[in-house]
């Protein structure tokens, strides 16, 4: 891999209309019973606007990522921006949903609006309140992101879906429990340094490796420590076609953005291969004119540890069936050749569905602007964000660089 601060000499002309991240905000993730959607939206959006050196009146369009699907009674979430921040009363706003990639769908819509010239400065907010239902209802709500005709009654909810994927992988390639435990331990260790993380606790490999009363099996070979947390929270970005002179943070820009979809029913593809994700990675790196070895970090969608391992294979770090070597050889550790999830990932940070894709981009922007604090990957100048909806159905990849 390239050393931090170095990018292979692949010239990339930057067009005049290259979109930039010019501000960001992020609430803590966790069980936030006392905060309603309006407060979450305010707590993410206002710091994002402030950090961009702007006022709400400078925003031309608002793009809200909110999955919901019954977590809260309130829908029509785009209209909530003006309820939370009255200065947005007449600002165009829209709500996007694309399962666990809802946040990235909102970002993509904002980027499209910027590219069209209709919007010059966009606010993107991803938000979710999940801890509003009993656990069984949370599982049933999330299963709406599966192919309900075939998978809607899967025991264990989405953990059951990924437990089945893990079981099939184990049957084909052998027991991967050491690798999954190492991924979980890595991400929880990284999350200790993330002030926004739902769980800021280093669980250690032994706890993650062995089942116990506090870490029981949940579905197939997956234990509780293999599953991301049910979280509330919000994150926000301000996007612009050019840097803002009065911004309080250094801008970050896209080198490429890619979306690739795949079949929703797992019965119509090999569940142990994230083929749509692999296509997104291949196309995104080519469009950015960089290689995997140029990247200094990746924030990837570790909704379950098996997902992160399959994403190693999708991004090209290992061939199919060999993803375990990436973590067991230390490649994806924070001090490895390609740090993966230096923020702690969904596993530690939490996974409020609508907020996740936006949160991942905030984490990347912090890295590339050198403001990630104890999470910082030294010298990071080029990174990638991979966010997916469903079991690698809606696959989004951003390649981002410091300006």
Image (cartoon, rainbow, N blue to C red):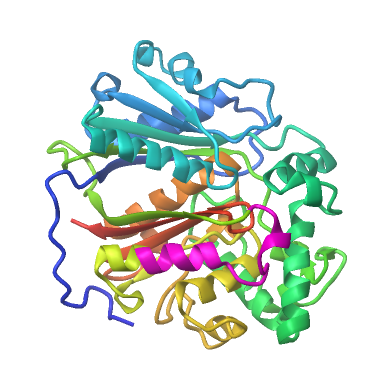
Q: What residue appears at the point 63 percent right and 35 percent down from the top-left corner?
A: 32
Tell me which secondary structure the magenta stretch mostly adopts: helix
Percent from the top left, x then y, of residue 358?
45, 45
Q: What residue appears at the point 66 percent right and 72 percent down from the top-left corner?
A: 272
User: Up-down: is 270 above or below 324?
Assistant: above
80 falls in the magenta region: no
104 left or right, relative to 184: left
Q: Which of the 4 image quadrants contains residue 113?
A: top left
User: Up-down: is 9 above or below 219?
Assistant: below
Percent from the top left, x then y, of residue 321?
62, 83
Dividing the image into 4 quarters, which one contains the C terminus? bottom left
Q: Which of the 4 image quadrants contains residue 238?
A: top left
Mark yes or no: residue 367 visible: yes
In this view, the residue farthest toward the front is 268
Q: Nearer the viewer, residue 176 or 87?
A: 176
Percent from the top left, x then y, of residue 365?
33, 53
Percent from the top left, x then y, of residue 355?
52, 41
The tally of labels here is: 0
Q: What residue appears at the point 21 percent right and 31 percent down from the top-left corner?
A: 117
Q: What residue appears at the point 59 percent right and 73 percent down from the top-left corner?
A: 309
269 falls in the magenta region: yes
366 left or right, relative to 212: left
Q: Nearer the viewer, residue 157 or 231?
A: 157
Mark yes or no: residue 370 visible: no
Dividing the image into 4 quarters, which one contains the N terminus? bottom left
User: Up-down: is 58 above or below 268?
Assistant: above
Magenta-colored span: 264-283
Q: Which of the 4 image quadrants contains residue 323?
A: bottom right
């Amino acid at each position: 891999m390239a050393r931090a601060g170095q990018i292979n000499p692949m010239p990339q002309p930057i067009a005049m209309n290259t979109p930039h991240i010019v501000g960001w905000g992020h609430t803590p993730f966790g069980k936030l019973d006392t905060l309603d959607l309006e407060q979450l939206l305010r707590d993410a959006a206002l710091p994002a606007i402030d950090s961009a050196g702007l006022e709400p009146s400078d925003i031309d369009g608002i793009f809200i990522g909110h999955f919901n699907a019954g977590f809260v009674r309130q829908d029509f979430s785009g209209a909530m921006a003006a309820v939370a921040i009255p200065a947005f009363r007449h600002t165009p706003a829209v709500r996007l949903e694309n399962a666990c990639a809802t946040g990235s769908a909102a970002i993509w819509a904002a980027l499209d609006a910027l590219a069209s010239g209709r919007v010059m400065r966009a606010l993107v907010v991803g938000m979710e309140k999940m801890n509003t239902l009993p656990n069984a209802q949370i599982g049933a709500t999330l299963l709406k992101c599966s192919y309900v005709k075939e998978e809607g009654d899967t025991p264990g909810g989405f953990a059951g879906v990924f437990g089945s994927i893990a079981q099939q992988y184990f049957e084909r390639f052998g027991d991967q429990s050491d690798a999954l435990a190492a991924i979980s331990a890595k991400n929880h260790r990284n999350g200790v340094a993330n002030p926004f993380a739902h769980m800021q606790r280093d669980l250690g490999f032994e706890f993650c490796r062995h089942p116990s009363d506090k870490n029981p099996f949940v579905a197939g070979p997956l234990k509780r420590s293999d599953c991301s947390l049910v979280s509330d929270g919000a994150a926000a970005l301000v996007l612009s076609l050019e840097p803002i002179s009065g911004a309080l943070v250094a801008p970050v820009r896209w080198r490429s953005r890619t979306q690739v979809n795949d079949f929703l029913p797992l019965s119509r593809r090999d569940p142990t291969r994230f083929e749509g994700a692999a296509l997104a990675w291949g196309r995104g790196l080519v469009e950015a004119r960089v290689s995997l070895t140029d990247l200094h970090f990746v924030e990837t969608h570790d909704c379950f540890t098996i997902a992160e391992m399959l994403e190693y294979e999708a991004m090209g770090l290992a061939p199919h069936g060999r993803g375990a070597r990436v973590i067991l050889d230390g490649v994806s550790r924070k001090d490895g050749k390609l740090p993966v999830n230096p923020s702690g990932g969904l596993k530690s940070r939490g996974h409020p569905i609508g907020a996740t894709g936006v949160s991942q981009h905030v984490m990347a922007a912090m890295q590339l602007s050198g403001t990630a604090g104890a999470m910082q990957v030294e010298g990071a100048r080029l990174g990638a964000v991979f966010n997916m909806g469903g079991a690698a159905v809606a696959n989004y990849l951003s390649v981002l660089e410091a300006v």
